[in-house]
Amino acid sequence: MDAKVIRRQKIRYNIRKTVSGTAQRPRLSVFRSNTDIYAQLINDEKGETILSASTKDKDIKAQKAPKVELSGLVGKAIAAKAIAAGITTVVFDRGGYLYHGRIKAVAEGAREGGLTL
């Protein structure tokens, strides 16, 4: 494996020791690939994904914009789905990535959408 990937995994494991989601306050997990970004609301007590959103969703993919702006739209989309499901507060899991750029855009989009992080 690449040294960067190993480093991110170690950071991710340390974050996961403290960050855990419940049914009332699920974990907002973010994964960033080179082309897309994915966000999930996860209940760690049951080990299940409650909701998800990504740049591969049809309404987000249809918009031609820079990746950072699309990431903000993913944050707003997951916030809208969460509020429709009755979830208002989440715990943010940056997944070992730096809180910058696309990861920050997802968090800010979720806040703009009405979630409390």
Image: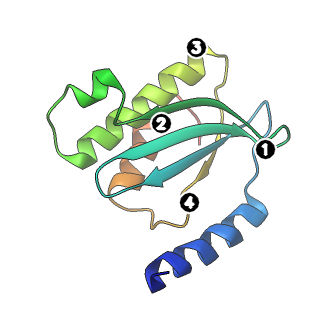
Tag 1 secondary structure = loop
Pick whichever of labels 3 and 1 is earlier in the sequence. 1
Closer to viewer: mark 3 or mark 1: 1
Q: How many C-alpha atoms fall within 10 Å of the one at disc 4: few (<14), some, or many (≥20)?
A: many
Q: CA distance from mark 1 to mark 4?
A: 15 Å
Q: Which residue is mark 2?
A: 111
Q: CA distance from mark 3 to mark 1?
A: 20 Å
Image coordinates of residue 31 in percent, x first then y, are 48, 52
Pick whichever of labels 1 and 4 is earlier in the sequence. 1
Q: CA distance from mark 3 to mark 4?
A: 25 Å
Contact? badges 2 and 3 (CB < 8 Å): no
Residue at 50% x, 81% y is 1
Residue found at the very far top of the displayed protein: 84
In this rendering, does residue 113 appear at all?
no
**Scheme of image coloration:** rainbow
Q: Which residue is mark 3?
A: 84
Q: Which residue is mark 4?
A: 95
Pick whichever of labels 1 and 2 is earlier in the sequence. 1
